[in-house]
Image: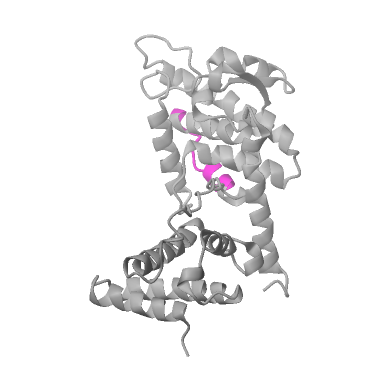
Amino acid sequence: MASPVEKLVRNYLDHLTVERGASPHTVAAYRRDLAKYVAFLAGRGIDDPAAVTEAEVAAFLAALQSPLEGRPLSVTSATRSLVAVRSLHAFAAAEGRTPENPAVGVRPPKAGRRLPKALDIAQVQALLDTPDTDTPAGLRDAALLELLYGTGGRISEILDLDVDDVTAVLAEPVAGLRLFGKGRKERLVPVGSYARKALEAWLVRGRPALAGAAVRPSPALILNSKGQRLSRQSAYGLLQKAAEAAHLGVEISPHTLRHSFATHLLDGGADVRVVQELLGHASVTTTQIYTLVTVEHLREVFLSAHPRAR
């Protein structure tokens, strides 16, 4: 025999179908969500809609997102379930079956921070191999890509560099590159051999050709075809072109290489505090989002490689 809560759900689904004209897909989704809710209430010894309090609804929402209850629901799915529960109780209150809607004060979960997208090392290598270094533009693109990935710098920080800013780096391998981040906060970032070689090739064989097209000489390190400082929009475009040439199959931005820089450092064993300094983050909390990426990577490798992982 159906409990009062089960009867309420059945009546509500009929209401959705007949009076509200909801689609079969919507009704099926509500039925699945409410079946979980009924089972949750039953587990707490509740079968009467009038006995449900705000605490029960909040506990149900928490259970949906708890890893202890199997695979936790995403924020979107948990919010959808809460909407179904709210609607059920609103229907019960409107029909006079309960004195009030106990779910009205339960807020949906907030969306968490999205994990940054990072390329794997093979994808980065494919991207860095795309510029045609027999041309001035290709030498420029190679230098820009190597700097973005090799320093983890923001695109604005790299494009703001002048030629004079890199002379110390080229003269002394241990010298760091001075980047100016948000609020003009200065930090010193090491530059690896690949980025230095790409810079040298650009300055010797590429930049003079593009600088010759300028009406007025520019001190900028990275130039466009008119001999002026390359814009962010142009940098984004050349990166998209490189991604297509590398057949990555994903859309990337200059920030993707910054994310990849941080992720690969942590994968390689770098301390999160070191990565924080290299990225120029004011708080280590900002940097710790990358640790979630590496943990997820470890989980994927475990699931695919261990014979008893699944």
Instruction: Determine whether, in the image, residue 271 is placed left or right of residue 285.
Output: right
Figure quadrant of the C terminus? bottom right
Answer above or below: position of 310 versus 192: below
Q: Which residues are magenta?
A: 124-136
Where is residue 51 drawn, in percent x and y?
51, 69
Does 82 lie within the magenta span?
no
Q: Nearer the viewer, residue 284 or 103?
A: 103
Residue at left offset 41%, top offset 75%: 31
Q: Nearer the viewer, residue 173 or 13?
A: 13
Where is residue 75 drawn, in percent x and y?
50, 56
Instruction: Determine whether, in the image, residue 235 is placed left or right of residue 279.
Output: left
Does 129 lie within the magenta span?
yes
The quadrant where residue 56 appears: bottom right
Q: How many marks?
A: 0
The quadrant where residue 163 appears: top right
Where is residue 1 drawn, in percent x and y?
48, 90
The quadrant where residue 180 appears: top right
Residue at left offset 42%, top offset 42%: 240
Q: Nearer the viewer, residue 262 or 15?
A: 15
Residue at left offset 42%, top offset 35%: 236
